[in-house]
Image: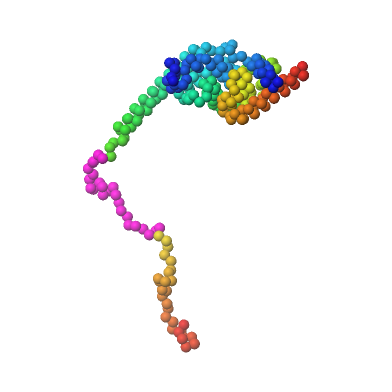
Amino acid sequence: MMQEKNTKLRDRVSKGWPPATENEPAFDAVWLAARQRHATLRRRYQRFAGVAAMVAAAFIVLYAQSPSQKTYIEVADLMESTYWTAPSDVLLPRREFDIYQDMPAMFESTEPAGGTLL
Amino acid sequence: MRDSDALDNNPHVSRSALEAIHSQVYGWAFSRCDFDHANAEDLMQQAYVELLSGNARFDNKSSLKTFVFSVVQNLARSRFRRLSSRLRLVKKYHAEAVETSAELHEPRANDDVWRAVRALPARQRDIIELVFCRELTVEEAASVMGVSTGTGRVHYDRAKKALRQRLRHWADEE
C-alpha cells in the first residue's frame, strides 16, 4: 500500500518535473569545450610557472651570492664603522640608604641631660 | 583496471562512462542553475574540467554518478556563493538595476505538482529530485547533498508527506 503510494507520487513528480532534454547539449560538444578550457588553463599555468621560475633564477643570480666570498677590509674603515661608549648606570635601580651597609654620621652631643650627653 | 579512454588525471573515470550519465547529470545541473540552459551547460563544462584536471578525483568509493552529481552540486554552491556576494554589492549601489535585471526561469509554473515541489524547502526539494527524477537511492542522494543518511531519510519522509498534503489540499480545492 505504502509502496504503491510512493510509486504514484514518484511518477507524478517525475512527470511534472521540468524536462531538461529539450535544449540538452550533446555530450561531445560539452566534452570538447571542457577539454579546450582545461588545455587553456594548463597553458596559462605553465606560462605562469615559467615566468615564476625565471624571476626566481634572476633573483638568485642578482642577490643571493655565496656567503663564503672573501673581501679585503681596511682596518681604518673598520674602526670608523664601529664606536664604543662607556656603560651607563641609568638603568640601574636608584641607590637607597641601607641600614646595614651605611651607618649614618652621628653628631657628637655636647649638651648634657641628667648627667649624660644627649 | 584502466579503461582505454580513461582520463589521465582520473584513472577510474572514462569518457564513455561520463557519456552514459550525461543526460542525468545535465538534468541535475539544469535544476542547480534555476533552469537556465546556458548556465547549466557552463556548469557541466566546469565539472568536466575538474575531472580532467584531477581536482575532483574519483576513487571508486561510490558510484560515478553520485560522484559527478556531488561535483556539480559543490560547483553550483560555490558559484551561488560568489554570485550572491556580488549581487549584495550591486544591490547596495544599484538596487533598482537588480530588480529589473533579475529574471527567474520558472518552467511550468502552473502545474500543480511543480507548484507543490517549488513550495518545499530547498533540501527536501533536492532529495525529492535526486530520488524521484534522477533515480538515486536515499543514501546516494544524502551523500550528494553532503548530509548523513539519517538526515537524508528525514528530509525525504518530510518531503513526501508535505507533497502528498499539498497535492491533496489542491485537489480538494478544485
Relative image position of residue B61 (x, y in whole percent): 50, 26
Relative image position of residue B3 (x, y in whole percent): 44, 17
Q: Which residue lies furthest to the bottom in this view?
A: A115
Relative image position of residue B138 (x, y in whole percent): 60, 24
Label tally: 0
- For the point 34% across and 57% down, the residue is A87
- Please say whether residue A58 is one of the residues in the magenta stretch: no
- For the point 33% across and 32% down, the residue is A59
Find the magenta span and give its range: A68-91
Q: Residue A96 lies in what quarter of the image?
A: bottom left
Relative image position of residue B43 (x, y in whole percent): 53, 20
Res B37 visible = yes
Secondary structure mostly taken by the magenta-highlighted segment of the chain: loop
Q: Residue A13 lies in what quarter of the image?
A: top right
Res B97 visible = no
Q: Nearer the viewer, residue B151 or B26?
A: B151
Scheme of colours in the image: rainbow
B164 to the left or right of A27: right
B163 to the left or right of A31: right
- For the point 59% across and 19% down, the residue is B135
- Please say whether residue A86 is one of the residues in the magenta stretch: yes
- For the point 31% across and 33% down, the residue is A60
Q: Quadrant of the N terminus of chain A?
A: top right
Q: Is residue A81 above or below residue A90?
A: above
